[in-house]
Amino acid sequence: MKKQLKILLAADSFFVLAAGLFGPIYAVYVQQIGGDLLTAGGAYSAFAFTSGILIYLIGKWEDHVKHLDKLLIASYALSCFGFVGYLLIQRPLHLFAVQIVFGIAGAINKPAYDALYSKYLAKTKAASQWGAWEGMVWISSAIGAVVGGYIAQIYGFRTLFTIMLGISIIGLIAVSFLVKKSK
């Protein structure tokens, strides 16, 4: 496996882990800030629509960009700001804004990530190397689900969000090595 692929896997594993810490307990948090299940669904929908609408447009633009690695770094940095946003939320409307930030970050990230990942695949090992990514996503999500529930239960959401931010910063640092490796 090429070093660039290992860097991409490592960086993404931190972001998947950070997000996975919150995923299963998201609705509980929404209730704590004064929302309900409709708020939880609506806020997630704001993320999904934002990402879904922008991903195609940004992907077409990224087809003409030479430095996808720098866009990937920008998307991870924007995600870090999203994690900061969780620390600042005081009411449901703020959650919608944070989800839109994550939607924009995802729309920048996914086409660039997939293009770079595909670029660095070994021609004869594409299936197993995509399998490595898929396995990483599920394992990181599983670990995040258990650990996130525990942290929120024992220490509260503020501590959880701080840890999520820290993990995402590690992912941002990891992906920055991609630029150094591609020079």
Image (tube, rainbow, N blue to C red):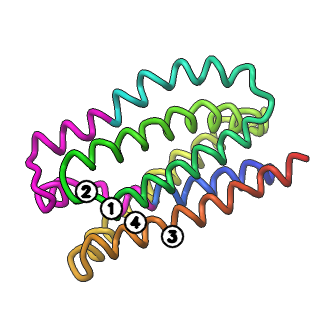
The answer to whether the residue labelled 2 contacts the one labelled 1, judged by CB atoms less than 8 Å apart, is no
Tag 1: amino acid:
Leu
Which numbered mark, 2 or 4, is in the foreground of this view? 2
Q: Earlier in the sequence, mark 1 or mark 4?
A: 1
Residue 165 placement, left or right of 38:
right
- Is tag 2's residue or tag 3's residue first in the polypeptide sequence? 2
Work out which residue is located at the far bottom of the displayed protein and give it.
154
Q: How far apart are the two marked residues, 4 and 3, measured between alpha carbons?
A: 16 Å
Image quadrant of residue 151? bottom left
Assign a secondary structure to mark 2: helix
Label 4 secondary element: helix
Front residue of 113 and 29: 29
Where is mark 3, residue-wise? 166
Give the residue displayed 18% in from the left and 45% down from the top: 40
Which residue position holds label 2? 24
For the magenta stretch, what is the residue range?
18-46
Q: Which residue is mark 1?
A: 88
User: Mark 3, residues whose alpha carbon is within 10 Å: few (<14), some, or many (≥20)?
Assistant: some
3 vs 1, front mark: 1
> Which residue type carries mark 2?
Pro
Q: Nearer the viewer, mark 4 or mark 3?
A: 3
Q: Which residue is mark 4?
A: 143
